[in-house]
């Protein structure tokens, strides 16, 4: 490809709209442009990187025996009503009507559509197993689209769905997909980790996320420093800490104390001179429309995913100020568990069970209660694990030390079981002629997010450093002076020769200053740069520079091909 004929609008300035580095660099390197919130156009350079990821995925999925399909983006509402998700999916599901007034949605995922296809076609155990995948555009009306392709509203996903006879067969398929995912992300050149995960609105019981480790990641992962345990903090169990005598002996009477204007944990603990692990935080939430109260220790954080599970609800959100005041009689910051209306469900974190003489809001503006004790001062609530694990908690598997790392979720695999096949009636006849529901799994990869994650992990202050397998071009030939015929001929020769060898080469033949060309080459992150300059006339040599290390060697033009092949091997 000749740069002068290519469409690669690079930017010198850092765009104001971008917060994370991958988003900034993808804009600056002319990979993407924003159309509207969460909607991006892929420019030729960006699309080439996207296609690289897609091809690695396709290759590995095919190798695992999965078959590629392509399903419609517009999906009829009836299917979603059959699965029960029409009412439960929430506002990420973009609903619309066609000209006949028929309700439809834009597919955020394709369990319904694929299950419908399979229920109509699969009859017998002889038709199984089946694993179907597609690489296609999804639409999710995300509340907060951000970070460019990381969290778009329209984005490219690889989604696969497997159909097996029984749980055992699903276990084998799941294991094979797990290994396939590991191979895919290894081939992409990413530093990643599979972690145990929550199954969310997709449903099912077992699931793993594939996390690319990066400080800007939106997810937190609990990793054991001793064994190989790793789980999303949404899921990682946090055991009740061992009871400490200092906090578990009832010595005080319950007493109301004035805490004027002290609302936050920091303010209250400083004012009353108590440690935060003596404080009980009272949180009022709405769970499927009903108010609930969650209690966690002052130094702990509520885990909404765990609370959702503990309550068995679909929708959970914090109550507004008005609701808090109506239920507790106090403004936000002074709510407490003592004297709440009888009919409110109260769930306390297990770390609170052994706590004595604790501090909590008094359900009265500007007052707290101290010396509060379960049983004596209030009915003990239900105790459940509803907090986020911390690095002070032991590993749930081996008791070792836990580290909290940040990650970007690039892939997610689930065992669905018969959730969708049951709801939609996708059955098969087993070898005894008995009708049984098909056992399913599903497997997703965010294609654009994978490219973004790769850049998040591979860049420096000058720009992107593409891992070779994802690089839109492997080589850039920088022609220093387009007016010099000898240089131009040498650059052209190298370009032709390397292209002939099957390499993807960008020849920078623009009438620009050398400095501009070097800067752009570094920004767009092509792994190998060949600089054709004055030396080619003096000694017949060109420079070969590696983008990652900056390491440069001088090579005679006739040796360039061999040298580059070596580097890219
Ligand atoms: P998240 O928790 O980040 O919203 P999710 O659990 O909703 O992700 P899945 O439904 O499992 O995601 O989708 C499969 C994959 O699609 C994810 O692992 C992720 O890589 C990608 N993905 C999901 N939502 C988006 C989005 N809004 N923009 C880009 N990629 C996405
Ligand atoms: Mg999501």
Image (tube, rainbow, N blue to C red):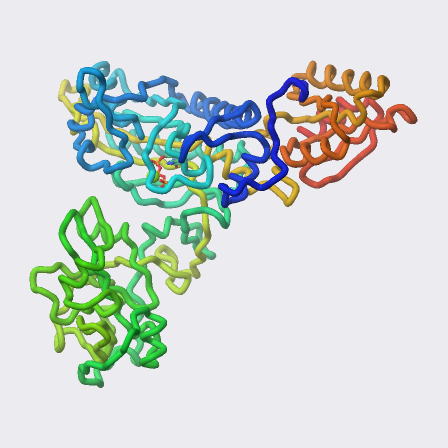
Question: Who's the residue at 33% across and 41% down the image?
Answer: 143
Image quarter of residue 431: top left
- Expressed as whole percent of the image width and height from the top left, the position of residue 497 reads 74, 16
Q: Quadrant of the C terminus?
A: top right
Quarter of image, res 88: top left
**Relative image position of residue 53 (x, y in whole percent):** 50, 28
Residue located at (66% from left, 32% from top) = 527
Q: Residue furthest left?
A: 342
Front residue (pair 184, 130): 184
- Please name the residue shown 77% across and 31% down the image: 514
Answer with the quadrant where ligand 2 appears in the image.
top left
User: On the rendered structure, is 419 left or right of 462?
Assistant: left
Percent coordinates x, y for residue 120 in the rendering: 20, 15
Furthest residue toward right: 538
Tell me which residue sits at (54%, 40%) in the image.
15
Q: Name the foreground residue: 434 vs 218.
A: 218
The image shows residue 52 at horizontal and vertical percentages of 53, 25
Q: Is residue 496 left or right of residue 207?
A: right
Is 324 above or below relative to 188?
A: below
Q: Quadrant of the N terminus?
A: top right
Disc count in the image? 0
């Amino acid at each position: 490809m000749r740069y002068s004929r290519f469409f690669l609008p690079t930017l010198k300035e850092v765009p104001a709209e971008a917060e994370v580095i991958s988003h900034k660099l993808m804009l600056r390197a002319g990979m993407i442009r924003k159309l509207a919130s969460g909607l991006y156009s892929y420019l030729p350079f960006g699309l080439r990187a996207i296609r690289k990821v897609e091809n690695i995925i396709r290759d590995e999925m095919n190798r695992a025996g999965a078959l590629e399909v392509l399903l419609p983006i517009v999906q009829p509402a009836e299917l979603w009503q059959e699965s029960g998700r029409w009412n439960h999916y929430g506002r990420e599901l973009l609903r619309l009507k066609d000209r006949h007034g028929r309700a439809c949605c834009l597919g955020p995922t394709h369990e319904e559509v694929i299950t419908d296809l399979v229920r109509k076609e699969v009859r017998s155990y002889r038709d199984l197993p089946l694993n179907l995948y597609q690489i296609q555009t999804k639409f999710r009306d995300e509340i907060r689209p951000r970070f460019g392709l990381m969290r778009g509203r329209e984005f490219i996903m690889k989604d696969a769905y497997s159909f097996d006879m029984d749980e055992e067969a699903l276990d084998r398929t799941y294991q094979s997909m797990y290994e396939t995912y590991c191979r895919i992300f290894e081939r992409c050149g990413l530093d990643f980790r599979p972690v145990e995960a929550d199954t969310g609105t997709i449903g099912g019981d077992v699931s793993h996320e594939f996390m690319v480790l990066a400080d800007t990641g939106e997810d937190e992962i609990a990793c054991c420093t001793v064994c190989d345990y790793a789980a999303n903090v949404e899921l990682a169990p946090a055991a009740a800490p061992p009871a400490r005598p200092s906090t578990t002996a009832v010595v005080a009477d319950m007493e109301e104390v004035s805490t004027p204007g002290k609302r936050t944990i920091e303010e209250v603990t400083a004012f009353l001179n108590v440690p935060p692990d003596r404080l009980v935080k009272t949180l009022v939430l709405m769970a499927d429309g009903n108010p609930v109260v969650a209690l966690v220790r002052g130094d702990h954080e509520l885990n909404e995913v765990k609370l959702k599970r503990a309550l068995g609800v679909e929708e959970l959100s914090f109550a507004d100020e008005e609701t808090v005041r109506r239920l507790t009689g106090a403004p936000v910051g002074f709510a407490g568990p003592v004297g709440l209306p009888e009919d409110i469900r109260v769930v306390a974190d297990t770390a609170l069970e052994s706590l004595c003489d604790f501090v909590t809001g008094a359900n009265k503006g500007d007052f707290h209660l101290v010396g509060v004790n379960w049983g004596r001062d209030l009915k003990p609530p239900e105790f459940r694990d509803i907090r986020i694990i911390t690095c002070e908690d032991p590993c749930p598997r081996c008791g070792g030390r836990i580290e909290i790392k940040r990650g970007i979720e690039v892939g997610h695999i689930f065992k669905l079981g018969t959730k969708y096949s049951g709801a939609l009636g996708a059955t098969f006849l087993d070898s005894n002629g008995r009708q049984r529901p098909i056992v399913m799994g599903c497997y997703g990869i965010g294609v654009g997010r994978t490219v973004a994650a790769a850049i998040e992990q591979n860049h420096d202050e000058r720009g992107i450093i593409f891992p070779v397998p994802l690089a839109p071009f492997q080589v850039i030939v920088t022609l220093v002076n387009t007016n010099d015929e000898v240089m131009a001929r040498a650059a052209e020769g190298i370009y032709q020769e390397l292209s002939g060898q099957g390499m993807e080469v960008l020849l920078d033949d623009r009438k620009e200053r050398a400095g501009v060309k070097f800067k752009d080459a570094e920004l767009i992150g092509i792994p190998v740069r060949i600089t054709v300059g004055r030396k080619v006339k003096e000694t017949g040599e060109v420079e070969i520079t590696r983008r990652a290390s900056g390491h440069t060697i001088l090579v005679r033009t006739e040796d360039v091909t061999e040298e580059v092949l070596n580097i890219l091997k």
